[in-house]
Image (cartoon, helix red, strand yellow):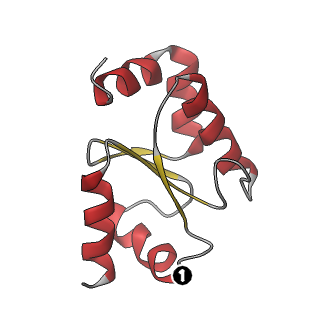
Amino acid sequence: MDVKQRIAKIVNSHPIVLFMKGSPQFPMCGFSSQATEALKRCGARFEYVNVLEDPEVRAHLPHYSNWKTFPQLFVQGELIGGADITVDLYESGELQRIVDDAQGK
């Protein structure tokens, strides 16, 4: 399986996926920390991929998603955006609705 197929499998196998630097317990950049915190505050159960541990995913995800920076949040197979968009959605209350829909609440 090539890297783009692997990315597609990850994105389509989990309702919420965050491609980030580090882990939710130990984010390795401020943007990944902000996105993780917004998801946690919404009670999201999410899969994550540490792009620092997978150089192939880190190199190819921007081409797959057409989004250059990390983190990248996918919900139900679709790119939501990076940290700024995730935080904006959280502050507006929209992220809670997105998370609830994805988790069947």
Q: Quadrant of the N terminus?
A: bottom left
Residue type indicated by callout 1: Pro
Which residue is at 70% across, 48% downward? 25
Q: Quadrant of the C terminus?
A: top left
Residue 30, given in percent of the width and then of the height, sits at 75, 49
Q: Which residue is mark 1?
A: 55
Which residue is at 50% across, 25% downward? 89
Q: Nearer the viewer, residue 99 or 78?
A: 99
Residue 94, given in percent of the width and then of the height, sits at 43, 19
The image quadrant of residue 61 is bottom left
Residue 69, given in percent of the width and then of the height, sits at 55, 60
The image quadrant of residue 29 is bottom right
Residue 52, given in percent of the width and then of the height, sits at 62, 72
Element on which disc 1 rests: helix
Q: Nearer the viewer, residue 21 or 48?
A: 48
Vertical order, 96 against 3 (above or below): above
Q: Is residue 103 left or right of residue 55?
A: left
Q: Residues within 10 Å of mark 1 (few under 14, many from 20)?
A: few
Which residue is at 49% across, 14% downward? 93
Vertical order, 79 against 52 (above or below): above
| Count of numbered badges drawn on the protein | 1
Q: Is residue 74 left or right of residue 50?
A: left
Vertical order, 96 against 68 (above or below): above
Which residue is at 26% across, 64% downward? 9
